[in-house]
Image (cartoon, rainbow, N blue to C red):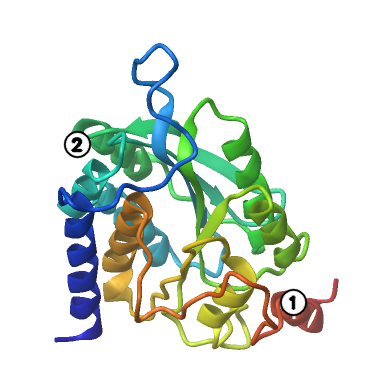
Amino acid sequence: MNCWSSFAAVLLTSAAALLSADAAPIPSTVSPINSAGARDPNTVDVELVLAVDISYSMDIDELALQREGYAQALQSSEFLQALKSGPTGRIAITYFEWAASSDQKVVVPWQVIDGPESADAVAAVILNTPIRRASRTSISGAISFAVPLLQDNSYHGLRRVIDISGDGPNNNGAPVTSARDAALQLGIVINGLPIMVKEPSYSTMDINDLDIYYEDCVIGGPGSFAIAIKHRDKFKDAIRSKLVMEVAGLSPERLVQPVAETRREPRVSCLVGEKIWDDRWGK
């Protein structure tokens, strides 16, 4: 059995435990029942921001795979099963694409997903929006753009998560660690999907250890995790697994570098992207 098959088996076992009658409830500080005893329509299991890289380092095939991966993940039986496992059985989701620190575009405004029909509707918007590309890579800009999306919407999530995918380190805008730390102070969890399907070259901003960079410089918060994609044919599997875990409130126990919830010295420079850019093209 290969590592992805093992990972899927662990994930499905964990999801089944969540659905069992004896499974412990997911702790929350927000009640899905309001003071009048009725279910609050704005309470959801998770407020999930999908922040997707569209920088020029991503080729058209990668951008299309990324779009298809998110759309198909939302429609998958695994995702819909995970949706049922939460206290409310619904999530609020928004999807935006990003590049430079000043370049973010919302593709899917906040929508509630509570079953196949609403999942299909969000997937259709993602697939039918024209693909675009833009310059620079500002993970810090994406995080800073995502925070007010979570702070200012009308939903009350039991958890709040920013999900960032990208194929290179931050090279524009504020340092990524400052944006990350500001989000973590608000109780927001950041997960990552580092895309490593191409060999790094001098003409790109790719780095060999992007997975470690994401683990030490980008993600954070209780239960945070990063899943690296190192082969094109694993794009869709990785996206689906990540979304299922985020909706069900799970974290992988293996195959992903565990992240300490206390500060530690990064194994790579969190300013590596800025240094590469300055060395090659100047400030």
Name the quadrant containing residue 65. bottom left
Picture layout, residue 41 above or below residue 187:
above
Mark 1 Cα-neighbour bin, 10 Å: few <14, some 14–19, many ≥20:
some
Q: Which disc, if any, is residue 116?
A: 2
Q: Dot 2: what SS? A: helix
Residue drawn at x 32%, y 67% is: 238
Which three-letter amino acid code belongs to the residue tagged 1? Leu
Q: Is residue 184 above or below residue 92?
A: below
The amino acid type of the residue labelled 2 equals Pro
Q: Quadrant of the N terminus?
A: bottom left
Q: How packed is label 2: few (under 14 Cα within 10 Å), some, or many (20 or more)? A: some
| Residue 172 showing in the rendered view | no
Residue 214 seen in the current view: yes
Q: Residue furthest top?
A: 36
Q: Earlier in the sequence, mark 2 or mark 1?
A: 2
Helix, strand or loop at mark 1:
loop
- Give the number of callouts: 2
Instruction: Give the CA distance from mark 2 to mark 1.
Output: 42 Å
The reply to whether discs 2 and 1 touch (Cβ–Cβ < 8 Å) is no
Q: Which residue is mark 1?
A: 271
- Residue 129's image quarter? top left
Name the disc covering residue 10, or none.
none
